[in-house]
Amino acid sequence: MANNAIFARLSNLWTGFISLWVSDIEKEHPEIAYQNAIASMIQKYTQLKAATGAIIARRQEITARLSSQERELASISNDLEAALATGQDDLAVVLIQKKNALDASITELRADAEQATTDADNAKDSLMQVKTEIDKLKAEKDRMLAQMHSAQARIKIQGQLDGLSVDAEVQALGAVRDHIKGQVAQASLGSELHNSDLDVRLAKLRQSSGSVTAKAQLEAMKQARAASAQASVKNL
């Protein structure tokens, strides 16, 4: 008993592993899961179609028997009327017995035919329902696989974009910016050093002094000319 329990547990464990493995494969390849589901439903549809065919055949067989017995009943009824009309009581008794048997059989056949018709209609409805589900599942398969492929493409593109780093470009531009700033600072420093050089300052001072001297000479010349002009006026 203990060994049987262990084997049963091992069997359940192995079945669980297989189920998980199959489930993982179906997740990785959903088209397989969809195709298996569709194939299973098609198999059920085929079986249901065969069963429906058998039910319809039974309905047709019952209907045919019912029609045959109804025709036979009509014939016996006519024969019975003729036997009664001709006074053939012994024949009439036999015909009445046949008529009663046919009446009972026809009553049963009518009930069977009604039930067979209901069964056939239900089977056809079930058959159409399964076919509709198969068509819906096929459409869902196409739609879901298209969504999956689109999502996979988006994930791939996002991964590629995430892998594109602009750090190197940013660092390169940073170095260029620093170099340009250094050049500008160097140029400014050269100008500042030039302006602070003693020779340059002395030259500027001399230039400024020369300008002041020239302006003083110009002013003296103007005053001399003005004085000369005034003297000329007085002599007149």
Image (tube, rainbow, N blue to C red):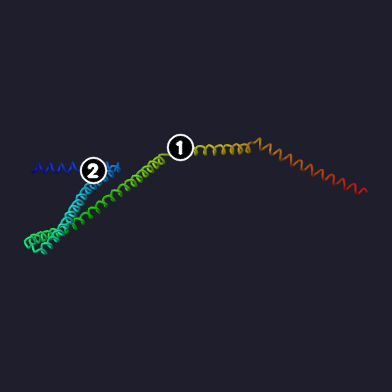
Amino acid, disc 2: Leu
Which residue is tagged 2?
Answer: 20
Q: Residues within 10 Å of mark 1 (few under 14, many from 20)?
A: few
Q: In the figure, is residue 91 to the left or right of 233?
A: left
Give the quarter of the figure containing the N terminus.
top left
Q: Nearer the viewer, residue 207 or 176?
A: 176
Which element type, helix, strand or loop, lies under badge 1? helix
Q: Where residue 58 is drawn, which disc sits there?
A: none
**Residue 16, x across and y down, in percent:** 20, 43
Query: Which residue is located at x 87 percent, y 47 percent?
Result: 229
Q: Is residue 27 left or right of residue 163?
A: left
Q: Earlier in the sequence, mark 1 or mark 2?
A: 2
Q: Position of residue 217 (x, y in %)?
A: 79, 42
Mark pair 1, 2: CA separation:
46 Å
- Residue 28, how many percent across, how many down? 30, 41
Task: Identify the element where label 2 is drawn.
Answer: helix
Q: Residue at x 28, y 42 (%)?
A: 32
- Percent across and percent down for residue 53 are 21, 49
